[in-house]
Image (cartoon, helix red, strand yellow):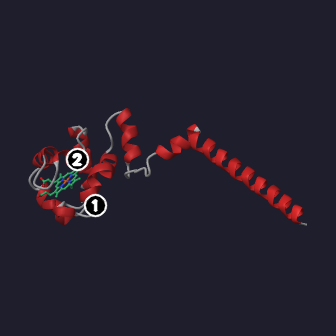
Amino acid sequence: MKRLTTLALKSLSFGLAALISFGASAAVQDDMSKDAIAKRIEPIGKVYVAGESAGNEAAASGPRSGEAVYGQYCTACHTSGVMGAPKINNAEDWEPRLAQGMETVLKHAINGFNAMPPKGTCSDCSDEEIQAAIDYMTAEI
Ligand code: HEC
């Protein structure tokens, strides 16, 4: 009876040892595979800004649309009106500004104006792309 128990225990512990070493080697293999390494070092989050892909695609094939530039850069301030930014298609906000003349408004957008950053943070935007974004922001006024 005692021998039988010992035998049972021995085979049980052998089984466990085999299981553990198998598990461990599988884990090591998994850890060292290229996929596993790539997965471990990949960025935790990917950020997609609204309109980003549209902007990038357009950049390869000509000027970005006003909508694409607005969606990627201007929306951060001009959708909610933070820091007094004139809100998109809000006539009350835009009329006094447009009254200065588009030339002045465009110049302010390109060079920056108080809390309005130069080119609205779109540093690689052409003047035309900034103008298109302004047109998009004021289209429904
Ligand atoms: C970081 C916030 C911010 C971003 C991003 C931003 N703006 Fe502005 N913008 C402002 C603020 C604030 C004002 C109001 C400035 C003032 O009148 O003192 C403003 C004003 C303007 C004006 C009016 C200028 C005038 O003469 O009255 C235009 C045009 C404009 N922004 C265009 C843009 C465009 C185009 C983009 C995107 C390419 C953009 N803005 C991105 C904050 C921003």
Displayed quadrant of residue 98: bottom left
Mark number, residue 37: none
Residue 113 pos. (x, y %): 11, 51
Q: Quadrant of the N terminus?
A: bottom right
Q: Quadrant of the C terminus?
A: bottom left
**Disc 2 residue type (three-letter):** Thr
Residue 56, above or below 9: above
Identify residue for label 1.
Answer: 79
Question: Residue at 8% of width from left, 53% of height from top?
Answer: 100
Say left or right for 107 vs 74. left
| Disc 2 residue lies near ligand 1 with CB under 8 A | yes
Residue 5 pos. (x, y %): 85, 64
Question: Residue at 11% of width from left, 60% of height from top?
Answer: 96
Q: Is residue 130 visible?
A: yes
Question: Residue at 43% of width from left, 50% of height from top?
Answer: 46
Furthest-right residue in this view: 1
Q: How crowded is the residue under tag 1: few (<14 C-alpha within 10 Å), some, or many (20+)?
A: some
Say left or right for 62 vs 99. right
Say left or right for 72 vs 25. left
Between discs 1 and 2, the one toward the N terminus: 1
Is label 1 in a helix, a strand or a loop? Answer: loop
**Disc 1 residue type (three-letter):** Thr
Q: Is residue 139 visible?
A: no
Is label 2 in a helix, a strand or a loop? Answer: helix
Residue 24, above or below 5: above
Identify residue for label 2.
Answer: 121
- Disc 1/disc 2 C-alpha distance (Å): 15 Å
Q: How crowded is the residue under tag 2: few (<14 C-alpha within 10 Å), some, or many (20+)?
A: some
